[in-house]
């Protein structure tokens, strides 16, 4: 039977801290024999930001913006020819900028963001992984990274709300929303196989996915 649709060639996975972005990106990249693009994590201002030091938010945000721009610009301004799986989208940077920067800092940030955004290709499909703040807090505790332990419950809740608001209005790509609070693509192969079957079918606009029996 002829293929009735062209599967996404450029997939990006998004969601808040410890929701499973990198894990799922690795799984999909292996399944698709795709190039994997990992979000830059070695930010020299991250620890000072978590400690709440003055001015650290702006330095942190501009560093991430430039590094994310460099990474995604390397893919080219149009849809890549070879399959790509990234564990972030360029626009996610703005979510945190609006959470963390002052009005004066945002004015500078927006100038750079607008310039960089014109050179970045949008994914064919974005997979938004979400979870409750309570679930994310447990995963942060389980990961037990010192810097992440300093995240307050209030900030984590703000991040979750900001992500939900952003993706409620997202229209740049087709979007698959997955609530991971009750599913696990690593420990439960059934959940993973159901997702892979879903990705073999067309996704148009915004759609939601929940594995059966989870």
Image (cartoon, rainbow, N blue to C red):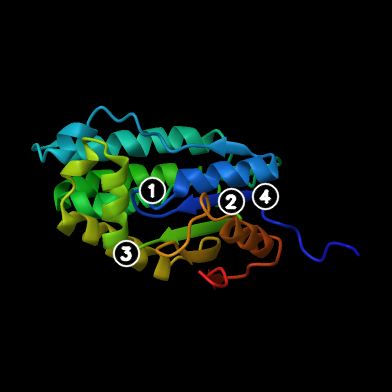
Disc number at residue 154? none
Q: CA distance from mark 2 to mark 1?
A: 22 Å
- Residues tagged 2 and 4 counted as in contact (Cβ below 8 A): no
Look at discs 1 and 3 and give the one toward the viewer.
3
Q: Earlier in the sequence, mark 3 or mark 2?
A: 2
Disc number at residue 11? 2
Label 1 element class: helix
Label 3 element class: loop
Q: CA distance from mark 1 to mark 3?
A: 31 Å
Q: Which residue sits at x=15%, y=48%? A: 104
Q: Which residue is mark 3?
A: 132
Q: Which residue sits at x=91%, y=65%? A: 1
Disc number at residue 114? 1
Q: CA distance from mark 4 to mark 1?
A: 25 Å
Q: CA distance from mark 4 to mark 3?
A: 30 Å
- Residues tagged 4 and 1 counted as in contact (Cβ below 8 A): no
x, y percentage for residue 191?
57, 60
Q: Which residue is mark 4?
A: 9
Residue toward you, 102 or 201: 201
Look at discs 4 and 1 and give the one toward the viewer.
4
Asked if 199 appears above or below 24 in the picture, the reply is: below
Q: Earlier in the sequence, mark 4 or mark 1?
A: 4
Look at discs 2 and 1 and give the one toward the viewer.
2
- Residues tagged 4 and 3 counted as in contact (Cβ below 8 A): no
């Amino acid at each position: 039977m002829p293929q009735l649709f062209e599967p996404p060639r450029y997939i990006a996975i998004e969601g808040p801290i410890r929701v499973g972005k990198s894990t799922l990106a690795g799984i999909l990249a292996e399944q698709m024999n795709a190039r994997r693009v990992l979000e830059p994590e070695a930010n020299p201002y991250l620890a000072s930001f978590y400690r709440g030091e003055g001015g650290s938010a702006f330095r942190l945000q501009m560093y991430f913006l430039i590094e994310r721009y460099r990474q995604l610009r390397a893919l080219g301004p149009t849809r890549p020819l070879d399959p790509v799986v990234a564990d972030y989208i360029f626009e996610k940077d703005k979510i945190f900028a609006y959470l963390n920067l002052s009005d004066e800092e945002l004015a500078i940030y927006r100038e750079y963001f607008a310039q960089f955004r014109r050179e970045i290709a949008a994914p064919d499909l974005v997979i938004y992984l979400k979870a409750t703040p309570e679930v994310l807090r447990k995963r942060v505790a389980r990961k037990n990274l010192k810097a992440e332990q300093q995240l307050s419950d209030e900030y984590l809740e703000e991040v979750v709300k900001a992500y939900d608001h952003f993706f409620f209005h997202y229209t740049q790509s087709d979007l698959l929303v997955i609530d991971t609070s009750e599913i696990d693509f690593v420990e439960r192969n059934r959940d993973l196989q159901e997702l892979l079957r879903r990705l073999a079918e067309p996704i148009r606009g915004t759609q939601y996915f929940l594995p059966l029996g989870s």
